[in-house]
């Protein structure tokens, strides 16, 4: 039996785990990381990265279908689904190798196997079952970064089967191109898959239990998005739920309960379940250590401590929002706190941007207008449409809007909400403004280059204070 002694061991190598390992090594800690599958975790191998590769293919295909709008001609346009998927998998493989390089560069020992925690002297001992036997890892500190998996519906007939009913993983490597697709759930994951398959020609229906799609977004943005998706041919059913799925030889019939109590039958070749995630808490030994778990996720304090001496948890394993960049930021906070760094602050979740990479893209940070008002804040709200921006019109992307929410008393930027081309790249500007506690004057006095999409960010601020120029 092999034994490894180190300062820190990280279990899981996703964007939380591998970032924690790198930062710990930078701070002089002898570090090991345990991974049972491929380096990079779900995000890099089966989530964030490969889905963006798929969506990029769909975006290029959509642009080619409208080539005449740009004075171009395309004949015989088609796509090869296998090649699209192969490209996506190749992107993930390349990035996975990159994480391996980073581990070597930072002298992080990689242990391939399945970890389980046992009681230890200063921190839990980690037992790793490897292909060669078992390795015992003794460390002063242990960070859990085991991530999460797709939540399923605990109802007979609605369980993923890998054939008719897909989770996100199967939807990323389809065996066929469905002619008709049913997506259950309209959060970022559901909408991204709906957008991808719809762009490639699948007759797509989205079912959402609440009264609007993208329920985490500002209601005005959700309404705008629904209008655009319907214009693209999607069928969207809100305040609706799937009561049952009847599997046939080649398709599925879904019975959907509508908000008026009536039912509707939708036939689909494939069904994508996108109803959230649940943490990978099982079979790690958490129960024997007394780690508290709430609704499938590990409970931690502001410093990511579990309450068990020397044991921490980060990323999708813990509280919302379940985003890769949130996991990476928690990793830095956790490791720097362990190392005794002075300038460490707990995570402020209101500074975390959220992005949906559909067509059109959606991005936001901070409070929605409704949430601000619920908190009793008097607000000033600015808006600017994409069709008032020269760069957006030149790109052939005139559908979209930028919305900003300010505290009417102090001028603080409370939130920003965007829909349209490349807004997932633009949102960091408002994120930085919120991190720096910017007020309206800071943003008004900033000089935005022309012609750019970013000018709309400026105009939206001006609009909130009655100074907008281009509308």
Image (cartoon, rainbow, N blue to C red):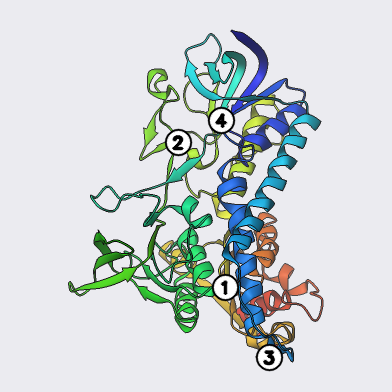
- Image: 171 above or below 46: below
Question: Going from the N terminus, do you reach mark 2 or mark 4 first?
Answer: 4
Q: Is residue 341 left or right of residue 302?
A: right
Question: Going from the N terminus, do you reach mark 4 or mark 1 first?
Answer: 4
Q: Secondary structure at mark 3?
A: helix
Write down the residue under mark 2. Answer: 280
Q: Residues within 10 Å of mark 3 (few under 14, many from 20)?
A: few
Comparing 417 with 277, the one in front is 277
Q: CA distance from mark 1 to mark 3?
A: 19 Å
Look at 51% across and 70% down and name the residue there: 195
Comparing 169 with 249, the one in front is 249
Q: CA distance from mark 2 to mark 3?
A: 49 Å
Q: Which mark is residue 359?
A: 1
Write down the residue under mark 4. Answer: 36
Nearer to us of marks 2 and 4 is 4
Q: Is residue 56 left or right of residue 184?
A: right
């Amino acid at each position: 039996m092999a034994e490894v002694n180190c300062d820190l061991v990280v279990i899981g190598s996703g964007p939380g785990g591998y970032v924690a390992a790198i930062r710990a090594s930078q701070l002089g800690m002898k570090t090991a990381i345990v991974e049972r599958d491929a380096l990079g975790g779900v995000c890099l191998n089966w989530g964030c990265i490969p889905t963006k590769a798929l969506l990029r293919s769909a975006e290029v295909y959509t642009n080619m279908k409208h080539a005449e709008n740009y004075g171009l001609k395309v004949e015989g346009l088609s796509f090869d689904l296998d090649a699209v998927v192969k490209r996506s998998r190749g992107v993930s493989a390349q990035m996975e190798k990159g994480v391996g390089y980073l581990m070597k560069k930072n002298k992080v020992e990689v242990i391939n196997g399945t970890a389980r925690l046992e009681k230890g002297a200063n921190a839990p001992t980690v037992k790793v079952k490897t292909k060669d036997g078992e390795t015992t890892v003794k460390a002063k500190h242990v960070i859990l970064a085991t991530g999460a998996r797709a939540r399923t519906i605990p109802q007979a007939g609605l369980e993923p089967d890998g054939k008719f009913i897909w989770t996100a993983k199967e939807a990323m490597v389809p065996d066929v191109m469905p002619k008709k697709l049913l997506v259950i759930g309209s959060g970022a994951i559901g909408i991204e898959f709906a957008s991808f398959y719809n762009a490639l020609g699948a007759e797509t229906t989205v079912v959402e239990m609440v009264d609007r799609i993208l329920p985490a977004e500002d209601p005005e943005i959700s309404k705008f998005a629904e209008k655009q998706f319907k214009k693209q041919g999607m069928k969207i059913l809100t305040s609706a739920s799937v009561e049952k799925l009847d599997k046939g030889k080649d398709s599925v019939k879904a019975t959907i309960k509508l908000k008026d109590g009536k039912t509707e039958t939708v036939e689909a070749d494939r069904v994508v379940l996108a109803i959230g995630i649940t943490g990978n808490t099982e079979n790690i030994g958490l129960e024997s250590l007394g780690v508290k778990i709430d609704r499938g996720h590990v409970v931690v304090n502001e410093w990511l401590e579990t309450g068990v001496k020397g044991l921490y948890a980060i990323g999708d394993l813990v509280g919302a929002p379940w985003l890769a960049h949130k996991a990476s930021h928690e990793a830095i906070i956790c490791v720097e706190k362990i190392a005794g760094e002075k300038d460490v602050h707990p995570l402020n979740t209101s500074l975390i941007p959220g992005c949906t990479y559909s067509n059109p893209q959606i991005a936001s940070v901070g409070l929605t207008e409704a949430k601000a008002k619920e908190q009793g804040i008097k607000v000033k709200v600015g808006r600017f449409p994409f069709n008032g921006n020269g760069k957006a019109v030149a790109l052939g992307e005139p559908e979209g809007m930028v919305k900003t929410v300010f505290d009417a008393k102090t001028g603080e930027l409370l939130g920003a909400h965007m829909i349209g081309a490349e807004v997932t790249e633009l949102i960091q500007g408002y994120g930085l403004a919120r991190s720096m506690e910017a007020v309206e004057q800071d943003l008004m006095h900033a000089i935005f280059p022309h012609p750019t999409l970013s000018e709309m960010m400026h105009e939206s601020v001006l609009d909130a204070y009655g100074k907008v120029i281009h509308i």
